[in-house]
Image (spheres, rainbow, N blue to C red):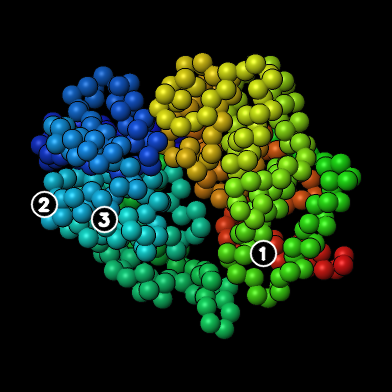
Amino acid sequence: MGLGKTVITLTAINDLKYNRFQVNKALVIAPKKVAEDTWTREQEKWEHLNLLRIEPVLGSLSKRVKALNTPADIYVINRENTEWLVDYYKNDWPFDMVIIDELSSFKNQNSKRFRALKCIRPLIKKIIGLTGTPAPNGYIDLWAQIYLLDEGERLGKYITHYREDYFKPDKRDAQRIFTYKPKDKSVDLIKNKISDICISLSAKDYLQMPDKVIDNRFIKLDSKVQKQYEEFEKEMFLQLDEDEIDVTSAVALSNKLLQFCNGAVYKEDGQEYAEIHDCKIEALIELIEEAQGQPLLIFYNFRHDLERIQKALKKLKLRIGVLKDSQDIAKWNNKELDILLAHPASTAYGLNLQDGGNRIVWFGLNWSLELYQQANARLYRQGQQNTVFIHNLAVDKCRDVDVISALEDKNSSQEALLESLKARIKKVKEMG
């Protein structure tokens, strides 16, 4: 992350098209905000890329069709429209080169976007996958990504065969296998199999990067709210049988506890919420004061986080933006904003935000190590001139602490969520 995958790829396309005459028309599939902003903005920075014509294929159906019929060298589409694009062209696929930006978003072999691209894969002559996090949940994630590169030549044509050859069951019950772990020497075998078509570059090996400081700020609830949390936690846990927790109920339960930590919990309809405390809001305002006018990129977790933060910051007379489109990105990078509020799921991949500031605040963390690393890399990347400060706001002695521990252990996955949940259940039952 942050090494310049976009400009490297554009340089390769430019060379293949105008110097080697090996590529006619290229397609980039990217996360929506990256498709809207990063690829065109990156081209504008580099004089040697001025011949390339880049056409975003975004927006309404009529706009997308018009864009596809506009002469260009590179067409950029958001990954949610992969299935539509394949259906639009069917067997008359015109792109001889395809670049998948954030290849890891195609790691699910059952997703519509993977199946669509798999159908027309034989019609693609050159294909490149870019990602800063290729296997966030382990090597099992690699099969679908590598299949799109080589059509199953290295890791096999079927995920079932890949699992049988390289993995063994890990967490399971009598009927289902929940997770797999590599067999002895499997990791080395997999690496060797794909080494001829994959290259891994680390920014620290090539760039003089500034320091990065992780600042975990543990917040204490007042005694009344702490007691309320413990009762809430205990009551919800006791509704479950420890041995019968499934992923869905565990995620829902964990989310409720994380909401409580942030200061509000959604009611049954999932729209309205009940406010419980302002402890994190107060800690956030203290951080803003501490920053002494330096811009802050604030990641929120739930919709009510955004609403409550916006309400609390109104009185501070700051220039506040919510990241929605390329205009918001431009305002941030031009230092026209004091605060930029963003959700990590819509910000994590590919966006260049390093010109706007060097301070990140996580108002609410989530379990995804991939999102956490990718979102932080929006500021901690090539071009950043200052030490990057990452402030994690966490309520002490509550669910937030489990998330921080999982992120630090680099095991932030459903497995970590379930294991920590079971540990808390055991602790609460012992207390009861």
Which of the two marks, 1 or 2, is nearer to us in this view? Answer: 2
The residue carrying pointer 1 sits among few (fewer than 14), some (14 to 19) or many (20 or more) residues within 10 Å by Cα, namely few
Who's the residue at 20% across and 27% down the image?
52
2 up-or-down from 139: above or below: above
Do tag 1 and tag 2 residues touch (Cβ < 8 Å)?
no
Left of 409 or right of it: where is 28?
left
Q: Residue 59 location in percent, x, y?
A: 30, 37
Nearer to me, 166 or 274: 274
Left or right: 264 with respect to 347? Answer: right
**Which residue is label 3 attached to?**
117
Q: Amino acid at mark 3?
A: Leu
> Measured along the vertical axis of the image, is residue 412 above or below residue 41?
below
- Total of numbered circles in the picture? 3
Q: Which amino acid, mark 2?
A: Asp
Q: In the visual, does 202 lie left or right of 417?
A: left
Residue contact between numbered discs 3 and 1, judged by CB atoms under 8 Å? no
Q: Quadrant of the N terminus?
A: top left
Residue linked to disc 2: 92
**Residue positioned most to the bottom:** 174
Give the foreground label among 3 and 1: 3
- In the displayed structure, 62 sits above or below 84; it is above
Residue 419: mark: 1
Q: Quadrant of residue 252?
A: bottom right
**Mark 3 / mark 1, whichever is N-terminal:** 3
Callout 3 secondary element: helix
For the residues labelled 3 and 2, the Cα–Cα distance comes to 14 Å
Q: In the rendered structure, which amino acid carries the disc numbered 1?
A: Glu
Q: Quadrant of residue 285?
A: top right
